[in-house]
Amino acid sequence: MDEPMYLLAGLTVGGNWPGAPDETTQFPAEFQIDYIRAWALDETPEVVVTPTISGGSRADTLVGDIHAGIVHDTIYAYDGADTLEGLKGNDTLVGGSGADTFIYRTGPSGHDVILDFDLLGGDVVRITKAIAGQKNFAGLYKQIKDNAAGDAVLKLADSGSITFDGISKAQLKYDDFVII
């Protein structure tokens, strides 16, 4: 817990638990809170940050350090179909061989660089609508521009970006992205 938070206390009706309202549900309902307490520890624990994360020769799931706002992570996967997620900070992601998945589901995302996005090898960027700021590939494609070096740069809704090193915008296609 290293980020500002807020407490949400609400009266929700329905959902997976306890299920949808039925004839036994009584409305209006009442939610009474006596008190809520929150406190902080006197000392902040020391955080050990590992800036380089490496996978092995199989399908790996590699996630950047949760404190990546502090450092720049470099995440290496080698062989196999790997899943890489940089989280916060300006991360460098290297998928290696195999059909790799680069995940963007929470923000802030930072300014990440994917060094070896394989257009023919089945690599894909899996991104949430909230981070993308778009609901479909057509909208997402409008947010991609080539930088001075000719690399495609996808601007994200949270002001972050994904740079596809050695890949131009014209080379990216709808099947290179999964918007969830």
Image (tube, grey):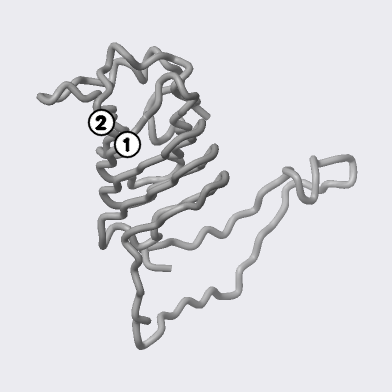
User: In the image, is 142 to the left or to the right of 85?
Assistant: left
Is the C-beta separation of discs 2 and 1 under 8 Å? yes
First in residue order: circle 2 vs circle 1: 1
Q: At 35% across and 74% down in the image, what residue appears? A: 48
Residue type, numbered disc 2: Asp
Residue 82 image point, x, y percent: 51, 41
As rendered, which of 64 and 15 lies closer to the eye? 64
Residue 88 image point, x, y percent: 33, 52
Q: Is residue 128 visible?
A: no
Residue tagged by mark 1?
Answer: 114
Q: Secondary structure at mark 1?
A: strand
As rendered, which of 155 and 16 lies closer to the eye? 155
Residue type, numbered disc 1: Ile
Few, some or many residues within 10 Å of mark 1 (<14, 14–19, 20+): many
Residue 159 to residue 89: above or below: above
Residue tagged by mark 2?
Answer: 165
Q: At 15% across and 25% down in the image, what residue appears? A: 147
- Residue 129 is drawn in which quadrant? top left
Residue 144 image point, x, y percent: 27, 21
Residue 119 image point, x, y percent: 40, 21
Q: Secondary structure at mark 2?
A: loop
